[in-house]
Image: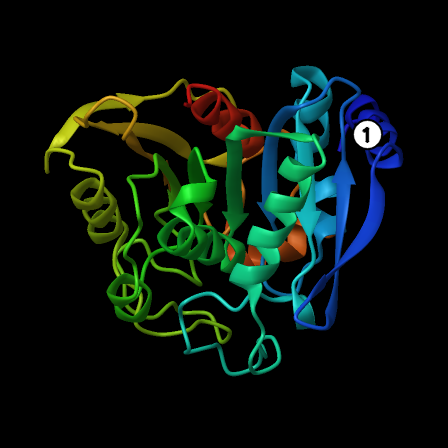
Amino acid sequence: MRIGALAASLAAASAASADTIDVNGVKRSYTAQLPAKRPAPLVIVLHGKTQRGADMITRTAWPQVAKREGLAVVFPDGLNNSWADARTKAGPALRGPPAGTDDVGFIAKLAEKLVADGTADARRVFIAGISNGGAMAMTMACARADLFAAAASVIMNLTDEAAVTCHPSRPVPMLLMNGTADLLVPYEGGRGSSYFAADGFWSTDETLAFWRRLNGCETDDAETTDLPDRAPADHSTVTRISSRCPRGHDVVLYRVNHGGHRVPGFSPDARFPKVAAGLLGPQNADIDGAETIWTFFSQFP
């Protein structure tokens, strides 16, 4: 990470504060970075499995985006560093949260609390997640569509279990961002080649088609745009695929060509980038995940 980016990240992180909320008798933790001017748009950012909310503060640009745009941004913590999304199958060496964990209730209560206390604008509450957090973001869009103006899922696809339980009360604009060389969540579906991979994933094309269908969009691509290759050294590029949808029902895919199980960004998304590259594949640096997602979110409602 560049010195300037590191300093900005630390400054933003220092403005964040940790807190807890009771959910069915269980104390749940989160970190919030809140603006002075309220009510503000709220983005709930969900970490991947084995991570914590704090990792999203130091390894993504969300703190900087929030500070610049005047957003409230919240980084919840999953129990056992994971989320109880709609899937029940898990990788062999990665345990999930304790049985009976109500993460839908936790995230919903957190959003409702911040709206009730005047921090968040109820019409502009958004959710974004990475990997297991991406699955949880889709689960929240399915279970509590009433809360969210839009959602984003990064490096994750649907499964039969997640899809069959998905009955949103209203269309939720959805952004997907997946790499074609993902070793954990294969772009073409099935089971990844990593030891930690789970089985039963849909392909990204099937996941995209599912959200188009739910949102009343046409089945074919509206426009396919190859974005500028700003970082040739990463050996990956990005293609933006849009959809023909009713107004406010947008569905868009950012396909990271030759990208791994990594969040695109202008600074490393892992503590040990070389190790991460070996285990998870390359990280794209042509776009930044948080910046791209906020550009999408900022259109709604």
The answer to whether residue 41 of the structure is visible from this angle is yes
Tell whether 106 sits left or right of 27. left
Q: Mark 1 — residue? A: 12
Determine which quarter of the picture holds residue 102.
bottom right
Quadrant showing the C terminus: top left
Residue 13 point in image, percent of width and height: 83, 36
Above or below, 194 against 301 in this view is below
Tell whether 87 sits left or right of 48. left
Choose between 279 and 187: the one closer to the eye. 187
Q: Amino acid at mark 1?
A: Ala
Above or below, 269 against 293 in this view is below
Q: Secondary structure at mark 1?
A: helix
Choose between 126 and 111: the one closer to the eye. 111
Quadrant showing the N terminus: top right
Query: 10 Å neighbourhood of mark 1: few (<14), some, or many (≥20)?
Result: many
Choose between 98 and 265: the one closer to the eye. 98
Q: Residue at x 63, y 36 (%)?
A: 115
Determine which quarter of the picture holds residue 288.
top right
Tell whether 204 sits left or right of 233. left
Q: Residue at x 47, y 65 (%)?
A: 85
Residue 19 point in image, percent of width and height: 82, 51
Q: Residue at x 77, y 34 (%)?
A: 33
Tell whether 95 sits left or right of 299. right
Residue 8 point in image, percent of width and height: 81, 25
Choose between 188 and 244: the one closer to the eye. 244
Residue 78 point in image, percent of width and height: 65, 63
The answer to whether residue 286 of the structure is visible from this angle is no
